[in-house]
Image (spheres, rainbow, N blue to C red):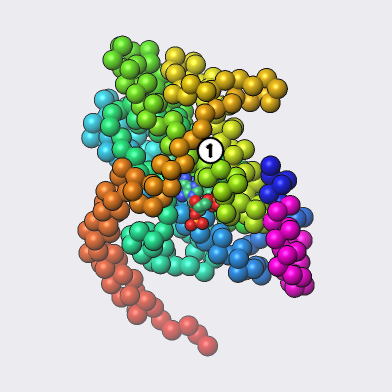
Amino acid sequence: MYAQMVETGAARLRAAGELSEQEHAFQARIDAGVKIEPKDWMTEGYRKTLIRQISQHAHSEIVGQLPEGNWVTRAPTLKRKTILLAKIQDEAGHGLYLYSAAETLGISRDQMTTDLLSGKAKYSSIFNYPTLTWADVGMIGWLVDGAAIINQIPLCRCSYGPYARAMIRVCKEEAFHARQGYDLLMSLCKGTVEQKEMAQDALNRWWWPALMMFGPPDQESVNSAQSAQWKIKLFSNDELRQRMVDQCVPQAEYLGLTIPDPDLKWNAERGHYDFGAIDWSEFYAVLKGNGPCNRERLAVRNKAWDDGAWFREGMQANADKHLKRRPPKAA
Ligand code: FAQ
């Protein structure tokens, strides 16, 4: 499937007419596995695609703090609370590395923030679902961070240097996040009947939205062919989704939980699990702003931005004062 995507991307380039010498050289560097760095020449399309993807990714990390943040004050033990706080702070850090990586492409942090707060920019669909019980915190670690790792490990090898390097650290931290989620679920699944039921209920609600995180099916993915050509995407949406299903089935069995998919079965011929049809109408509704929590998430981010105005203004005033005091550079 990936080879097909690259071929489609190449065909598109041929159809668009001859590439200029500079564009040829750019594509040849990518084909040779050379990393593209901020000061290197790049096509406008490459720059825009990266700004789109990296800024959406950054916004996802920032908005992604909210569902779990809902449980900080209600974590059942001091240990769980400390783990949860550390995890949420890591997500904020990931957002910051990613905003910095996007800034190297010529967009300002202010512009990205404005786009998020106005609802113009996308962030991952998964963060528009509510966290109704403590088991949801475990489910986010296992499934959402699990999906993020599957998607992001290949990004460590993508063609744009700053993005690839940011992903290495992000993936290390995501591995801890996934472990803590699975550990939380193990405790619930070994606990009382009610605790195990709570874990099963959370799995029933998070399973399908987690599979949607990988994006639309390949035939509907508008950006894949070009992103594959530029080595921003190394695997297709469906390939990574399949990886997620294959990874999660034995993990669910170990927990004693049932994946809510009657069509899930091992296909020996393919060497993969077959799984049921995804309700893509739900995914597109969430993208349009009509998921269960879209409005609430944006309202919370806007309020945090407004509440922080006094702090930003204070920092700016202080920075301006120091700039004025700095002696002029010697000629
Ligand atoms: N949600 O043509 P494609 C995390 C949009 S981080 C919303 O296939 P592409 C950590 C897509 O933007 C999670 N929109 O697009 C954490 C495009 O619209 P556009 C975030 C989606 O870019 C854990 C349109 O659909 N990870 O979880 C989604 O080639 C726990 C057509 O789609 C990343 O961002 C979606 N799920 O492939 C934090 C990873 N899927 O922009 C806190 C980097 C697709 O043309 C707690 N991103 N769309 O208007 C990627 O790998 C890619 O951007 C994909 C989409 C694979 C997400």
Provide residue 194's location: percent of width, then percent of height.
28, 15
Q: Is residue 293 left or right of residue 171?
A: left
- The residues colored magenta run 7-28
Residue placed farthest to the bottom in the image? Answer: 331
- Residue neighbourhood size for the residue with mark 1, other residues' Cα within 10 Å, grouped as few (<14), some (14–19), many (≥20): many
User: Which residue is drawn at the image coordinates 48% and 67% (left, top)?
Assistant: 107
Provide residue 70's location: percent of width, then percent of height.
27, 38
Q: Nearer the viewer, residue 280 or 178?
A: 280
**Looking at numbered disc 1 in the image, what kind of residue is underneath it?**
Ile
Can you identify the residue that label 1 sits on?
Answer: 149
Provide residue 319's location: percent of width, then percent of height.
33, 71
Residue 266 visible to an observer of this rendering: yes
14 in magenta: yes
161 in magenta: no
Q: Is residue 24 left or right of residue 107?
A: right
User: Which residue is drawn at the image coordinates 77% and 55% (left, top)?
Assistant: 32
User: Which residue is drawn at the image coordinates 38% and 46% (left, top)?
Assistant: 286
Q: Main secondary structure of the magenta part?
A: helix
Q: Give the answer, above or below, for where 251 lies relative to 85.
A: above
User: Which residue is drawn at the image coordinates 33% and 62% (left, top)?
Assistant: 118
Q: Is residue 230 left or right of residue 75?
A: right
